[in-house]
């Protein structure tokens, strides 16, 4: 609402946060507050009316920090025997919600709590303190708690799981995985089912994470395929919790793992390009014929890499059991990578997190703003 009022004065201001422009905005806000007060008491200032519900009792003043600057001395009228609450701000609110969202965006973008103070000097001379930034971010913690308890509804046919590793100082400067689970429907609509900061990618950690999804309502009987990277903990957890669900080993992870065995590292790009071409096959028979041709070419110089690619190769072709239009989406864990890439990009400037809560808070704030697209 304040942003709408601002548009009425910004065209007349040479500087959008100049004192004159803020004064005009203040007068507009006070005018709207006065109109709300009049609706409450059913009578205007200095008017007489039989419909009057109350009498004025002076006013109180307060400041409000907005994305257009710090507005001071806002007059809010009071009434005898009536409680008046304006729709512009709540009790004890000193900052516009849009301003808090802007602070959260800065923090998620990698700016520390202390550096945010310097940024906010554009809106108020003193800026806001690091402790104020921390209080603003507490709202993220509340959203995260609600997010973790929300029920999982609907049918989730395809699920993609993977992990991204983060540095958390309270864990003795060791890296820890953040486990992700994403579902994609036939129309390429993506849903983040959940994430969890774990200590490892062990069977216990993955089983705990996937079990929580089931407890929140995920219908395992509706899940037709789970795509994963082949980590031992994932395989064991899936065998325990989804014993009857088909599983697809990510083709990209398979090729990368094979390329890691190359003796001649300069051939990595050529090896991976030709290996990935195998998955452009029209059917399973064509894919195996392409694999054999690839093996005949590369085996003499790179036997370990070829053997690695051929090992469990059939587990990377499960996607071919589904509709052909879905093959490109189902053969890799790329859908969950969309979230992980955004997390990496936003957290790189931070290098490490102070503790678990800080890590989970930032990851949630990032993924909550991701607009995934797997249609390409």
Image: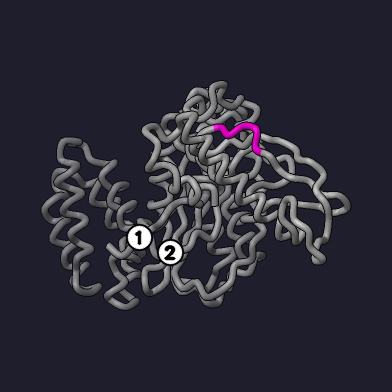
Quick one: which residue is furthest to the left in this view?
297
Q: Is residue 119 left or right of residue 47?
A: left
Q: Is residue 200 visible?
A: no
**For numbered disc 1, what is the local secondary structure?**
loop
- Tell me where residue 235 appears, x and y as whole percent: 49, 58
Choose between 118 and 257: the one closer to the eye: 118
Looking at the rendering, which quadrant does residue 279 occupy? bottom left
- The quarter of the rendered structure image containing the C terminus is bottom left
Q: Is residue 155 left or right of residue 331?
A: right
- Mark 1 vs 2, N-terminal side: 2
Residue sitting at x 31%, y 67%: 317
- Magenta highlight: main SS: strand
Q: CA distance from mark 1 to mark 2?
A: 7 Å
Vertical comparison of 90 with 225: above or below: above
- The magenta region covers 70-74
- Tell me where residue 178 appears, x and y as whole percent: 52, 45
**For numbered disc 2, what is the local secondary structure?**
strand
User: Do the numbered discs 1 and 2 sit on residues whose CB atoms are within 8 Å?
Assistant: yes
Q: Is residue 50 left or right of residue 144?
A: right
- Residue where numbered disc 2 is placed: 190
- Residue where numbered disc 1 is placed: 373
Choose between 196 and 5: the one closer to the eye: 5
Residue sitting at x 53%, y 60%: 193
The answer to if 214 sits in the magenta stretch is: no
Residue sitting at x 46%, y 73%: 157
Vertical comparison of 227 with 76: above or below: below
């Amino acid at each position: 609402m304040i942003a709408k009022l601002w548009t009425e004065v910004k065209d007349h201001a040479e500087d959008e946060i100049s004192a004159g422009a803020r004064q005009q905005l203040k007068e507009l806000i006070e005018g709207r507050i006065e109109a709300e007060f009049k609706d409450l008491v059913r009578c205007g200032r200095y008017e007489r009316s039989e419909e009057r519900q109350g009498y004025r009792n002076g006013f109180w003043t307060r400041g409000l920090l907005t994305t257009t600057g710090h507005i001071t001395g806002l007059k809010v009228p009071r009434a005898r025997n009536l409680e008046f609450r304006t729709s512009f701000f709540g009790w004890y609110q000193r900052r516009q919600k849009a301003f808090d969202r802007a602070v959260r965006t800065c923090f998620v973008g990698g700016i520390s709590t202390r550096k945010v103070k310097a940024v906010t000097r554009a809106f108020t001379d003193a800026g806001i303190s690091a402790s104020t930034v921390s209080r603003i971010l507490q709202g993220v913690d509340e959203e995260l708690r609600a997010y973790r308890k929300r029920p999982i509804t609907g049918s989730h046919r395809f699920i993609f799981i993977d992990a991204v590793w983060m540095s958390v100082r309270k864990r003795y400067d060791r890296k820890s995985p953040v486990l992700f689970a994403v579902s994609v429907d036939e129309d390429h609509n993506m849903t983040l089912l959940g994430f969890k900061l774990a200590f490892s990618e062990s069977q216990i950690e993955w089983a705990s994470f996937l079990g929580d999804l089931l407890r929140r309502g995920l219908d395992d009987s509706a899940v037709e395929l789970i795509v994963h990277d082949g980590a031992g903990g994932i395989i064991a957890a899936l065998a325990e919790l989804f014993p009857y669900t088909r599983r697809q080993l990510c083709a990209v992870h398979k090729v990368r793992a094979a390329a890691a065995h190359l003796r001649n590292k300069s051939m990595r790009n050529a090896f991976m390009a030709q290996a990935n071409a195998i998955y452009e096959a029209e059917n399973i028979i064509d894919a195996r014929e392409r694999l054999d041709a690839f093996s005949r070419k590369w085996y003499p110089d790179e036997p370990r890499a070829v053997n690695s690619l051929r090992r469990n190769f059939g587990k990377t072709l499960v996607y071919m059991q589904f509709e052909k239009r879905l093959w490109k989406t189902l053969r890799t864990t790329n859908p969950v990578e969309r979230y992980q890439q955004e997390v990496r990009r936003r957290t790189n400037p931070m290098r490490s997190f102070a503790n678990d809560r800080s890590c989970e808070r930032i990851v949630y704030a990032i993924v909550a703003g991701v607009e995934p697209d797997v249609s390409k």
